[in-house]
């Protein structure tokens, strides 16, 4: 019995082995099916081929669609083939997949995700590099239509494409991860990324160890209409080369321009508004266009101010740097919006064709404004701005614009490289950077201070920034009739107390009937109180304190104006930043002169000033080297538009010798 059982087991094993061998000998009916169809259009209708095609359609739809397209090219009647496959699989009611189904299956090759605001995105593999497109953008629609044509040799209908996009977007929102999408500049952990905007979607990775070019950055960038590529940065340049293309009149102005550019290369605000003013022929538009081309080039670099908040935030969501040209004045609403844009803020509007849904815009962006007049006159925006006044360029010093831009394009990679070197220094020093007091744009001041030692001595930025803020205070007060009148009233007294109505009358007596009846004058006590609150910050900086209170049993609202003494630690040029592990600027050794930082060997004394501008013999002083253009560099002669310097700002044999 045992022998018979073992014999049966052996026979069964032999039968299984023979069956396996026979199965291995049976060829796959799909192998060579395209070639057979080219010779015989009915080859795909063989029972074995139909069975395999039905199984492939069920298990691997993408491969099935690709094979179906090849069979169609070989001469097979794919409509009849779809019906035969449906009959083989038992789906008697279908004529094959719909166009929307095919589009949805083709989209599976893309990596879907959604942004924090719910917008669906897709990562596409295009010619070996990754591209990121919103699902509703033209870029993704074109890619999907191309995939459909490659699979079916036909075009999808608009209805099928729209239906497929709805499903794909839903899958990105509910079934895919959430990622932040950036425009031009992004950040992850302790690293920054600058999108070059080129066809290969490369980026520059920046950290405390240096910067480098990478192919597939870990952060996602979005390309908006009009974006142009940045040049590949080159190391070893000098920041002074940039000065030869900008109509700046002093070292302080140039320091502030470079500090603003370094802020633009950071992935978070606040970003100060740079306000350019000057008469016709001072190259304001060229100044703005060069800064835009250096940091965020665009086919339309300079634009007019938008007419409403919605247009401004749409522009902010599609570009990193915003430049507005020939601004003649800032209405109150756009001044407030620019404040939100400088420090970060949102805007919501009702979505079109809906009653409840909103479209949200949330952004912080660097802004450039230029105009003939001093366009920033409201204190809240002035506190977030850097002011530059450009001087007219004599006709004999002008040069053709085409020649200027050709020279700038040749130097742009090296200028960008030296700015990236400064960003590396900023990332390294920022955790240890401290300031004695923090201004309104505290994060900007800390960042510029951390970066500055890669370009010039410590304290150079703070000195320039404080001086610019002091000038802004005077300019804004002079432009505000209420602030000017308050200063005039307090010129002969130290205290004023009364109601808003009393103050309105007192101020009207000072300014005269013509000003008191103008549109810029408040029409009542309530409006006056609001104007005083707006001007209070800058009035305090010149020693006038505005207070609001109530007196008596009737709780009458009163306004108290007092003349105060400047604080013990005023903002003054020469006040140096300090760091826990670094010496103060007044005792720190000065960096050596070299062609990279552009400084001459001779030190230049910068005196600390009191808030009223008078000298202080006991105030600390710093010695800073003048910003010197490297001699013998052909790029230094690139911009003949610069006017000759006058007074203390003259060019000598050793370069610029301007008091900081």
Image (cartoon, rainbow, N blue to C red):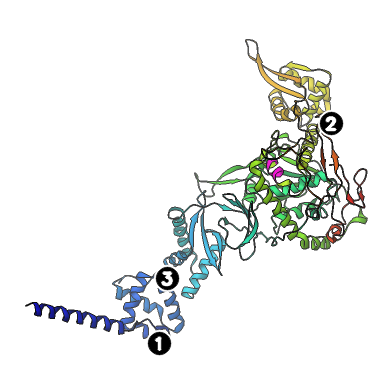
Q: Earlier in the sequence, mark 3 or mark 2?
A: 3
In contact (CB < 8 Å): disc 3 and disc 2: no
Residue at left offset 80%, top offset 63%: 406
Could you tell me how far apart the alpha carbons at marks 1 and 3 are, in whole angstroms?
22 Å
Could you tell me which secondary element the residue under label 1 belongs to? helix
In contact (CB < 8 Å): disc 1 and disc 3: no
Hey, which quadrant is residue 639 in on the image?
Answer: bottom right
Image side of residue 369 versus residue 401, left or right: left
Extreme-top residue of the structure: 553
Tell which tag, 3 or 2, sits nearer the viewer.
2
Q: Earlier in the sequence, mark 1 or mark 3?
A: 1
Tell which tag, 1 or 2, sits nearer the viewer.
2
Could you tell me which secondary element the residue under label 3 belongs to? helix
Image side of residue 181 versus residue 41, left or right: right
Q: Nearer the viewer, residue 568 or 498?
A: 568
Q: Is residue 240 above or below residue 623?
A: below
Which numbered dot is residue 94? none
Residue at left offset 37%, top offset 85%: 43
The residue indicated by pointer 2 is 613
Extreme-bottom residue of the structure: 39
For disc 1, the neighbor class at 10 Å (few under 14, some 14 to 19, many from 20) is some
Q: Earlier in the sequence, mark 1 or mark 2?
A: 1
- Residue 352 inside the magenta-drawn segment: no
Q: Nearer the viewer, residue 60 or 375?
A: 60
Span of residues in magenta: 445-450
The residue indicated by pointer 1 is 36
The residue indicated by pointer 3 is 62
Considering the whole magenta stretch, tell me its main secondary structure: helix
| Residue 96 x/y as whole percent | 37, 72
């Amino acid at each position: 019995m045992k022998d018979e059982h073992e014999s049966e087991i052996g026979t069964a094993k032999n039968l299984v082995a023979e069956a396996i061998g026979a199965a291995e000998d049976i060829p796959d009916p799909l192998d060579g099916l395209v070639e057979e169809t080219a010779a015989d259009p009915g080859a795909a209708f063989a029972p074995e081929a139909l069975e395999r095609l039905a199984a492939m359609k069920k298990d691997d739809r993408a491969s099935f669609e690709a094979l179906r397209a090849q069979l169609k090219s070989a001469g097979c009647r794919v409509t009849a083939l779809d019906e035969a496959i449906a009959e083989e699989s038992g789906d008697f009611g279908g004529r094959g997949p719909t166009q929307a189904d095919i589009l949805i299956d083709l989209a599976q090759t893309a990596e879907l995700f959604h942004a924090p605001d719910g917008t669906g995105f897709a990562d596409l593999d295009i010619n070996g590099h990754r591209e990121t497109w919103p699902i509703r953008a033209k870029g993704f629609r074109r890619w999907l239509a191309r995939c459909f044509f490659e699979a079916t040799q036909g075009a999808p209908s608009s209805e099928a494409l729209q239906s497929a996009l709805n499903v794909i977007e839903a899958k990105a929102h509910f079934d895919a991860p959430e990622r932040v999408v950036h425009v031009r500049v992004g950040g992850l952990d302790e690293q920054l990324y600058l999108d070059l905007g080129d066809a290969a979607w490369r980026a520059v990775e920046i950290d405390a160890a240096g910067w480098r070019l990478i192919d597939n950055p870990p952060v996602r960038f979005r390309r908006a209409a009009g974006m142009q590529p940045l040049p590949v940065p080159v190391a070893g340049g000098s920041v002074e080369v940039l000065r030869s293309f900008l109509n700046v009149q002093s070292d302080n102005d140039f320091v502030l321009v470079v500090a603003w550019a370094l802020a633009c290369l950071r992935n978070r605000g606040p970003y100060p508004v740079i306000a350019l003013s000057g008469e016709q022929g001072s190259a304001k538009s060229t100044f703005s266009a060069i800064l835009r081309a250096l940091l965020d080039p665009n086919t339309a670099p300079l634009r007019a101010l938008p007419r409403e908040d919605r247009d401004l935030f749409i522009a902010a969501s599609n570009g990193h740097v915003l430049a507005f040209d020939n601004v003649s004045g800032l209405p109150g609403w756009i001044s407030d919006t620019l404040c939100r844009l400088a420090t970060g803020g949102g805007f919501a509007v009702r979505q079109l064709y809906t009653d409840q849904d909103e479209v949200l815009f949330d952004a912080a962006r660097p802004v450039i404004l230029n105009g003939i007049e001093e366009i920033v006159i409201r204190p809240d925006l002035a506190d977030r701005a850097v002011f530059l006044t450009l001087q007219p360029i004599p006709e004999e010093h002008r040069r053709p614009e085409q020649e200027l831009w050709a020279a700038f394009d040749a130097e742009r990679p090296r200028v960008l490289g030296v700015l990236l070197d400064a960003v590396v220094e900023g990332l390294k020093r920022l955790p240890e950077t401290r300031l004695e007091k923090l201004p309104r744009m505290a994060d900007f001041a800390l960042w510029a201070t951390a970066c500055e030692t890669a370009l010039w001595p410590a304290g150079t930025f703070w000195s320039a920034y404080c001086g610019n803020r002091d000038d802004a205070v005077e300019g804004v007060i002079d432009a505000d009739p209420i602030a000017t009148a308050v200063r005039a009233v307090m010129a002969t007294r130290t205290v004023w107390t009364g109601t808003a109505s009393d103050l309105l009358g007192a101020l009207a007596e000072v300014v005269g009937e013509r000003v008191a009846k103008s549109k810029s004058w408040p029409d009542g006590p309530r409006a006056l109180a609001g104007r005083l609150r707006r001007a209070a910050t800058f009035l305090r900086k010149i020693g006038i304190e505005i207070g609001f209170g109530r007196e008596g049993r009737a709780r009458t609202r009163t306004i108290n104006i007092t003349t105060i003494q400047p604080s013990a630690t005023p903002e003054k040029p020469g006040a140096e930043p300090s760091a826990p592990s670094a010496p103060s600027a007044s005792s720190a050794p000065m960096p050596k002169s070299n062609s990279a930082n552009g400084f001459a060997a001779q030190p230049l004394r910068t005196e600390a000033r009191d808030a009223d501008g008078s000298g202080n013999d006991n105030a600390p002083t710093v010695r800073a080297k003048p910003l010197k253009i490297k001699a013998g560099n052909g790029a230094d002669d690139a911009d003949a538009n610069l006017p000759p310097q006058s007074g203390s700002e003259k060019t000598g044999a050793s370069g610029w010798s301007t008091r900081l």
